[in-house]
Image (cartoon, rainbow, N blue to C red):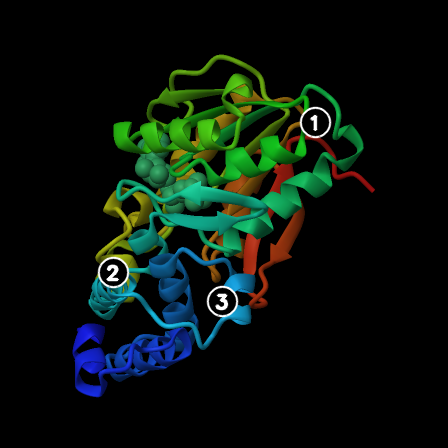
């Protein structure tokens, strides 16, 4: 799209509010959900504005440079690239994380995992907890937990070298590198330590369902971050079978799950001796997180 053309036709520069409306119409016509919100985010990025600055100055004119940047962003969004990937960052928990092409774009649903994990360690918030994040990707979960648990340390594992680099970059961005180690490996295979808290958001999409996902996901999230095997549960099997050697009765294991996988993942864990402590729903009301321990359930 070209916002510059509109400017030439009217000879008046577009205002920020007009530019948002124009981009929103353009995106809406191309089937983009949440076009208005995306147009605002892209305008803010193109003009380097905070939410407040934009709210205070809707009638300010767009410079040519801003109009060109916004046009480029809008064209990418129309091609179904997520806003977070266009801008290279996304808010997660209380943090601003970089979103590299090699990692899953961290989702709000995953904040439910963070919230659940924190509830289990609430009474040990200041203790030197050891955390294992399996399939760290952007490092979203490890960063969020370390940001809330000031004496905790984390090991973040990913099979992808690029994902490991992205995890390390976000840990550094959040000032958390000194309490974390990033390990490239197949789940916990290379580890010997014992952990107080194990968290994981493994790939859980059925292989045959990947082709039907929205283009934002199918074309932009890496296949390694999505593919959960033929029934979507293969990665849980790989992880759960190896966990008992890394944990004790007090360790809490917290998994993110697909919306219809709670019973299946719980059954896999119970078969390995785990007791299910909690199934938590996400903001959309779907069962999203399973938490379990090897020891007896706590009151
Ligand atoms: C769904 S993404 C989760 C990323 C991040 N934890 C989050 O919640 O946004 C799953 C991650 O698991 C990694 N992964 C896939 N198979 C793996 C394996 N066998 N061992 C370690 N990591 C793996 C992928 O590279 C990807 O980064």
Quadrant of the image for the N terminus? Answer: bottom left
Residue under pointer 1? 250
Tell me the distance, in whole angstroms, between the alpha carbons under discs 3 and 1.
49 Å
Query: In the picture provided, is 91 more to the left or to the right than 122?
Result: left
Query: In the picture provided, is 47 more to the left or to the right than 286?
Result: left
Q: Secondary structure at mark 1?
A: loop
> Could you tell me residue 223's position as x and y percent?
24, 47
> Could you tell me residue 188's position as x and y percent?
42, 23
Q: Which disc, if any, is residue 224?
A: none
Residue under pointer 2? 65
The residue drawn where x is 47% and y is 75% is 58
Tell me the distance, in whole angstroms, between the alpha carbons under discs 3 and 2.
17 Å
Tell me which numbered mark, 1 or 2, is placed earlier along the sequence. Answer: 2
Tell me which numbered mark, 3 or 2, is placed earlier along the sequence. Answer: 3
In the image shown, does 165 or 242 lie closer to the viewer? Answer: 165
Is residue 177 something that shows in the picture? yes
Q: Residues within 10 Å of mark 3 (few under 14, many from 20)?
A: some
For the residue with label 2, is its CB less than 8 Å from the closest atom of ligand 1?
no
The residue drawn where x is 59% and y is 44% is 114
Tell me the distance, in whole angstroms, between the alpha carbons under discs 1 and 2.
57 Å
Q: What is the residue that sits farthest to the right in this orientation?
A: 299
């Amino acid at each position: 799209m070209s916002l510059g053309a509109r400017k030439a036709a009217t000879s008046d520069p577009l205002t920020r509010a007009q530019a948002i409306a124009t981009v929103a119409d353009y995106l809406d016509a191309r089937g983009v959900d949440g076009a208005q919100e995306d147009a605002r985010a892209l305008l803010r990025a193109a003009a380097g504005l905070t939410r407040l600055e934009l709210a205070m100055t809707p009638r300010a004119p767009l410079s040519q440079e801003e109009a060109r940047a916004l046009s480029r962003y809008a064209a990418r969004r129309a091609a179904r690239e997520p806003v977070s990937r266009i801008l290279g960052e996304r808010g997660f928990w209380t943090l601003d994380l970089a979103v590299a092409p090699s990692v899953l774009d961290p989702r709000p649903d995953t904040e439910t995992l963070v919230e659940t994990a924190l509830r289990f360690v609430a009474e040990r918030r200041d203790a030197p907890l050891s955390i294992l994040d399996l399939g760290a990707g952007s490092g979203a979960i490890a960063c969020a937990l370390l940001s809330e648990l000031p004496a905790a340390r984390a090991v973040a594992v990913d099979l992808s070298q690029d994902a490991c680099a992205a995890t390390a970059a976000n840990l550094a961005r959040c000032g958390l590198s000194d309490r974390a180690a990033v390990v490239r490996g197949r789940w916990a295979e290379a580890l010997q330590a014992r952990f107080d808290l194990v968290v994981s958001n493994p790939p859980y999409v059925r292989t045959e369902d990947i082709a039907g996902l929205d283009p934002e996901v199918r074309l932009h999230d890496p296949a390694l971050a999505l593919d959960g095997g033929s029934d979507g549960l293969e990665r849980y099997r790989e992880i759960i079978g190896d966990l008992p050697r890394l944990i004790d009765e007090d360790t809490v294991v917290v998994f993110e799950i697909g919306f219809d996988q709670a019973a299946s993942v719980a059954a896999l864990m119970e078969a390995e001796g785990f007791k299910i402590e909690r199934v938590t729903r996400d903001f959309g009301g779907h069962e999203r997180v399973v938490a379990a321990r090897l020891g007896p359930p706590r009151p």
